Amino acid sequence: MRKLFSFGRRLDQALLSSRDKEYAGRGYHTLDWELRKIHRAAIKGDAAEVERCLKRRFWDVDARDRKDRTVLHFACVHGHIEVVTLLLRRRCQIDIYDRLNRTPLMKAVHCQEEACAIILLGSSNPNIKDIYGNTALHYAVYNKGTSLAEKLLSHHANIEALNEEGNTPLLFAINSRRQQMVEFLLKNQANIHAVDNYRRTALMLAVQHNSSSIVSLLLQQNVNIFSQDMFGQTAEDYAVCCDLRSIQQQILEHKNKMLKNHLRNDNQGKTSDSKFLMSLGDLTDFQKAKLQARHGGSHL
């Protein structure tokens, strides 16, 4: 079992490394020979030159470079509001894709160019997915602030959108160790019981990344601590196998708190009480004695 978790942790570290590389590379790497004159002008933020190019060839408003990036993509990446406004006035395509199926809105969010994103949000579809299944909200989650995520949600971004790994924005935030974003998404009613393609819950991912503060936050939200992944392991199993004793203690204390709260409730029948308490797993002898006394000395 430890070998399985060791492999899982190495796999997640590799995925996290590739994820960081993918999301940290916010802009575009460009070579001069790949670009047209209008693209160079957009990158520089030279709205007057973009205007002159469009007067000569008006159809260049959606001109692509050799990697399918448009003038609007470049203007958004570099935060040139005047060029973005000009292109929209010239009726450019707003939800146009680059080679990775990323829209100008995605790139504006990815590069944290909030002013450009706000301009686009009135007309752009925030729920388009790139080749990795990520939406603009997934890109906003990787950022440290919540402002862009808040604006996306106000324009009906899907808070439960799944990428190709089965990650909702909440699960993605936990994988990326973005506690502020986790708190923000939970406040906006993100599904705390969502699971990824391996049926890992938010709590399992927080444990796997040794994020005790996020574990505490999830436990406060009464996340299900008994859920099992596709290998039949619970979040507590993750903590044990990864030798995360402090997190294991957090989960145990939460389990004991659930037990005490349930014992105080006199409105439940004996059968439902017994089933609930037995689901808590390893009870101490003292807890079993209390349970037996409550149920008239019956055997568990």
Image: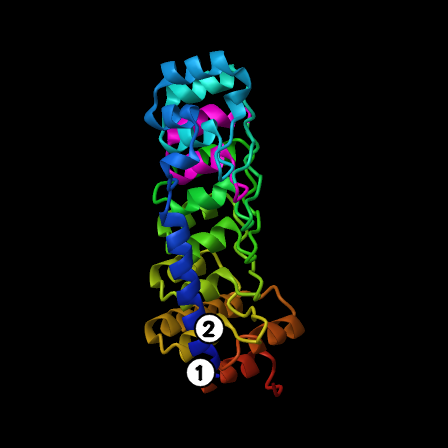
Q: Is residue 147 left or right of residue 223?
A: left
Residue at x 62% of width, y 75% of height: 275
SS category of the residue bearing label 2: helix
Residue 231's mark?
Answer: none
**Picture quadrant of residue 78:** top left
Q: Is residue 139 left or right of residue 229?
A: left
Q: Is residue 257 visible?
A: yes
Residue at x 43% of width, y 66% of height: 12
Task: Please tell me which residue lies in front, 241 or 90.
Answer: 90
> Earlier along the polypeptide chain: callout 1 or callout 2?
1
Residue at x 35% of width, y 74% of height: 244
Please determine whether, in this image, residue 234 is positioned above or below residue 74.
below
**Residue type of the residue flagged with mark 2:** Gly
- As for residue 50 lying within the magenta part, the answer is no
Q: Is residue 148 visible?
A: no
Residue 2's mark?
Answer: 1
Tag 2 residue? 8
- For the stretch drawn in magenta, the main secondary structure is helix
